Amino acid sequence: MESELAEILAPYEEKKGVLIPVLQQVQEKLGYISEEAISQIAKTLKLSGSDIFGVASFYTQFRFVKPGEHTVKICLGTACHVRGGEQILNTVKSYLSIDTGETTKDGKFSLERVACLGCCALSPVIVVDEVVHSKMNPLKTANLLSSYYQGGGDEV
Amino acid sequence: MNTKAEMNLITLNIDGQEVKVERGSTVLEAAKAAGTYIPTLCYHPDLSPFGACRLCIVEIDKMRGLPTSCTTPADEGMVVHTNTPRIQELRRNVFELILSEHPWQCLTCPKNGRCELQEVASHIGLGEVSVPPIYKNLPKDTENPFFRRDYNLCILCGRCVRMCQEVRGVGAIAFTYRGGQAMVGTAFDHSLQDSDCKFCGACVDVCPTAALMDKSSLWAGIPDRKVATICPYCGVGCQLKLEVKDERIISSVPDPDGIVNHGQACVKGRFGIREFVHHRERLTAPLIRRNGEFKEASWDEALDLAAKKLKSYTAGELGVIASAKCTNEENYVMQKFARAVLGNNNIDHCARLCHAPTVAGLVQSFGSGAMTNSINEVGDAACILAIGTNTMEEHPVIGVEVKKAVNNGAKLIVANPREIDLCHFASLWIRHSPGTDVALLMGMMRVIVDEGLLDSAFVKERCENFDTFRESLKSFGLDFVERVTKVSRDRIIEAARMFATHSPATILYAMGITQHSHGTDNVMATANLAMLTGNVGKPSTGVNPLRGQNNVQGACDMGALPNVYTGYQAVADPAIREKFEAAWECRLPSSPGLTLVEMIEAAYCREIKALYLVGENPALSDADTQHVQESLAQLDFLVVQDIFLSETAEFAHVVLPAASFAEKDGTFTNTERRVQRVRKAIEPIGDSRPDWWITCQLAKRLGGRGFDYSCPFDIMEEIRDLTPSYGGISYERLESGGLQWPCPTNDHPGTPILHTNIFTRGKGRFIPLKYILPGELPDEDYPLILTTGRSLYHFHTGTMTRKVAGLNIIEPEGAVEISPQDALPLGIAQGDKVKVSSRRGEVITKAKVTEVSPPGVVFMTFHFAESAANILTNPKLDPVSKIPEFKVAAVKVEKI
């Protein structure tokens, strides 16, 4: 991990105005912005850790917890919202015992909410990793999630 | 006013009133100059304009919208309206929004009566808040020992963030998250202890609400009075205001108008004063040792006994150790006591252990052994060489100036074996081997001369002995320098070019230069470098030794040294001696006395039999302390005068309780030669008395004449009469700020920069130098180099700081810093208990495995009696200045 970071950071040593691209590359590589990454970036760019966190936490694109094995995205765009997206979100939250932006303790799932995935005819939808699951309801949602614990998952 | 200044002025109209301000001022500053009130919350004069609170909006003719006056530059002919109905309406709306997120529980708020929101509210005249209130319900930070953080009261003005970032250059806090969730915080919302925070308290001082509050005075209410005085910790001499309520100090706050510190302080001055002054262990009555135990006694008993005993020895058997923590007036009285009453020149103080080589070295080079320039000039330097100084920890407020210079684009060269905080914003960090400073500096000068980067005109016109010096550079070929210093030749060349080509360039140094067995050579090397590049006698240049104790400069100035009277007038000079004999109405000894280290040695050999020791702690602070303690135990009679029962006082026969700096009047002289007023804030604790009073009482009992001073003012008048460089320094003049010596007459403005037209000694003298090895080098038995220093959170032997609970929460104990490369083969892990031993002794401490220390070098602070670094240090002396080699000792570290 340290060497991966060093590779990303090498071209930016002591440069100014490069924080956001650096953060983006780090997130692309590690999947999130870790504490270690922030202290490493701080050293390279001669910024304080708090400053970097301040910038990163301003943008929703950056996450600070390690993503789970699977990423669950719940759409709350207009169509999904009207057709019960909120209920789906609540089902996932209580099923996984996490809030949006968090990862389950076992590292299996992380949860995100998004605004419109462009498939409104299928609403409400859940996207697990890259697979879209359409016309969801709470029961289907629970079944979908439980299937991942039974080794199925991707086939559902 | 001259025409140039006139041309720089612009005229604008504010609410119908014409006002002239300097070009570059903002509309808000112009309004202030016109005496017009505009409400502000995010504005602070020390910070960049922010425009966040939107309260300072104004209308400006021919300008669209309602600009914020704090961010709008004033311009010629502007017509500004600050208080139209339209502005008032909008301000009320803005203020309502601010108040909707700030609870209105003023009666139960510790800031009640001092809150800036209340002040703004009273001006804006808000009838009601129509926006529904939001309470964020954030947890309060109670972990941090010095200030309470309650962000439910925060209005996001960002003053704290900008202060931490812009002025202190730390950036421990930032705005985090976004929109309604936005707040001030740290990375990952860690506690401040786990962030970069240095607890300087600058954020607390600028907070307009009770979001950040000093914990110690949280519920103390509004102080009865504020007394302006000088911080008793380091030599920077920050102006503080002691807040007093019911005759107790409740807080110490840096003075925004302080000429040295501009409203800044460090954790010790901000949070480390109240507790030690009022500590229950303060000495409150004289003590006499009876049957091996201390028993309280009356002043008469104690003083009579001390006088009777001191009388029974010959002059040569007596010695006085004065104190760099006491005022000028007190040090003057002490040296007068030693010379006029005891009849010898055996007087010295701890300057011997810090800057004796500075005095010895710079006198030879320049003719005057003190900082050549002033602290406020550092910020304007184009290049700073910080060698042997851990400025951010040891002189934090000068560190603020260094950061200011770097922010202004200055090049910072840090030469230090350890990766200190300064390294993180240095342009170039030179990690030379401890004890190789002469080689490094001479190597740099060799490059400067070889490449023709020297200031030939300056060298020719202002200096002498250059040719001999140039000869001595021949032995500093880069191959040799590279091998000795372990710094690559490229870095040495880069440093030399950087220093020589950026003007003005200044040199800052501290104990890393002086505390060597060749400390005087190190000092002269810095002086050579400054002269070679023409960096003496001009603003933001010079050789600037940063002095450690609050009044170590003053104690030297006052002649608490074995070879000079006040103002460095030699005791060996018959004319000078006659002057003092006439003034003091007595015969004075002509031969210089013993230095501090020599007195301790003489005690060991029983040549010195009795010592009068004021406010020092040699049992912990001197090199090879086991030997020092044995020497103290040899004394027939030891009088210790202090505010606490120090490790040294344990050896005393009579202990005299002294008043602290907060309980007396006087003056301190800071590192930049600035004499400043110390003012009494409270009455002496218990039956303690000011040091000057005690010494005078003792002197009178021994038949001394001329000790009938009624107050420190009388003493200062006598000092002025006898000391040319202090001649113009009167209490009356000091009321309007400090004065930098030399200040010979009442109409002399003081001297911020020394050697401007001519060096004190005439011409600056280049001194040829040789590389000399440290007194002790690592070998098979003791394979590591131990170097010692100070931490930000403690001061010297901890007599004061270890009485402050908060400082002990942050740094409760000592440790030995060791590099991972050295720790691994020894099987030492973080926090392991280890034994550090040298040829002098051993100490048990904890290991701190860190890359701050380079391989082969370990580091300890000397604050902690239970793991006293000075048990290990090498007492080998510099032959000129008699300073021991605190900075290099061979040791071994073992896991236990």
Image: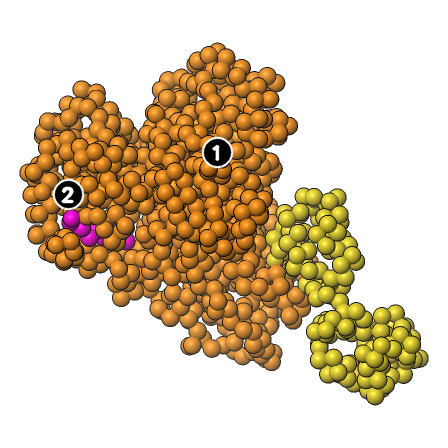
Q: With respect to residue B102, does B399 lie above or below?
A: above
Foreground mark, 2 or 1, reads 1
Q: In this figure, what is the number of numbered marks?
A: 2
Q: For the residue marked with disc 1, what is the amino acid?
A: Asp
Residue B107 placed where, x, y %?
42, 77
* Left or right: where B161 falls relative to B308: right
Label 2: element kind: strand
The magenta segment is: B653-662
Q: Is residue A118 visible?
A: yes
How much space separates mark 2 and mark 1, taking CA atoms?
41 Å
Residue B191 placed where, x, y %?
54, 64
State the residue in front, B289 or B171: B289
- The residue at the point 37 percent across, 66 percent down is B217
Q: Which residue bears the numbered disc 2?
A: B637
Q: Which residue bears the numbered disc 1?
A: B779
* Left or right: where B714 falls relative to B199: left
State the residue in front, B24 or B490: B490
Residue at the limit of the structure toward the right, as seen here: A121
Q: Which mark is residue B863?
A: none
Q: Colour of chain B?
A: orange
- The residue at the point 49 percent across, 43 percent down is B858
Q: Quadrant of residue B247?
A: bottom left
Q: Is residue B598 magenta?
A: no
Q: For the residue marked with disc 2, what is the amino acid?
A: Phe
